[in-house]
Image (tube, rainbow, N blue to C red):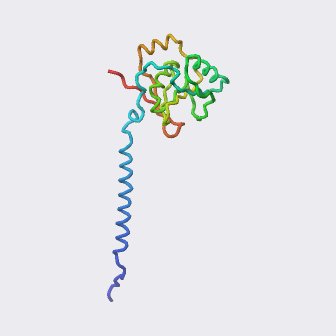
Amino acid sequence: MRPRVSSRRPIPPLIFLVVLAVIALGVWFKVLQTDQARPSSVADACPAPPTVTEMDPATVRVRVLNGTDTAGLAAQATAEFVGRGFLVEATDNDRSGREVLAVGELRYGPRGAEQAAFVALFVPGITLVRDIRSDDLIDVVLGPDYATLAAPEAVAIAIATPVAPTVTACATADPSETVEVEPEPSA
């Protein structure tokens, strides 16, 4: 007896497998291309604020937010900022859901980097957090260690002899996550 020969043609399943392989290669190509478009390091994604330059406080828009359970802290800081000539657009509680530690966080977008460096002089010890906002509005989120703004004399000295911030951070697309970045030593 002769072995039975299958009458099925192997061509359609082979074509199907080749089409699947081409689709899989296309997907991997797109994934790798997208991965290469991302910044190569956290430092590239989150540059430190620029060197501080003196500004007119009336040109800097800030929003003062209370990141603590202490009632009235944002109102107190708002009065201090207004007394120094800043344009305070809002005073409220921080509703981001982030835990704010130490003196607080100064949140800003790429367009507000220079303003953030200037505002940071008024709140020594604040952590600068660059996020993805598209405007130049600066959020000053007060933490449990906040007491008062720096004395005008201390701010004047800091403007005359700028020092790079000690700690900066970047918020990811999820505002509850940040990446801390230590500035590189200057040469």
Q: Nearer the viewer, residue 76 or 84?
A: 84
Q: Which residue is nearer to you in this view: 84 or 43? A: 84
Q: Position of residue 106 (x, y in %)?
A: 52, 27
- Residue 47: x, y in percent? 40, 31
- Residue at the image point whose x is 39% and y is 32% from the top: 43
Q: Is residue 15 visible?
A: yes
Residue 1 lies, with reference to residue 174, above or below; the image says below
The N terminus: image quadrant: bottom left
Q: Residue furthest bottom?
A: 1
Q: Position of residue 38 (x, y in %)?
A: 39, 42
> How many badges with numbers are in the image?
0
Q: Position of residue 92 (x, y in %)?
A: 63, 29
Q: Is residue 84 left or right of residue 31?
A: right
Residue in the picture at 35% in, 58% down: 25
Tell me: residue 150, above or below residue 45.
Answer: above
- Give me the residue at 42% from left, 33% from top: 46
Please give the name of the residue rendered at 38% of the width and 34% of the height, measured from the top-left corner.
44
- 130 on left or right of 71: left
Q: Residue furthest top?
A: 153
Indicate the quadrant containing the C terminus: top left, top right, bottom left or bottom right. top left
Residue 67 in view of the camera: no
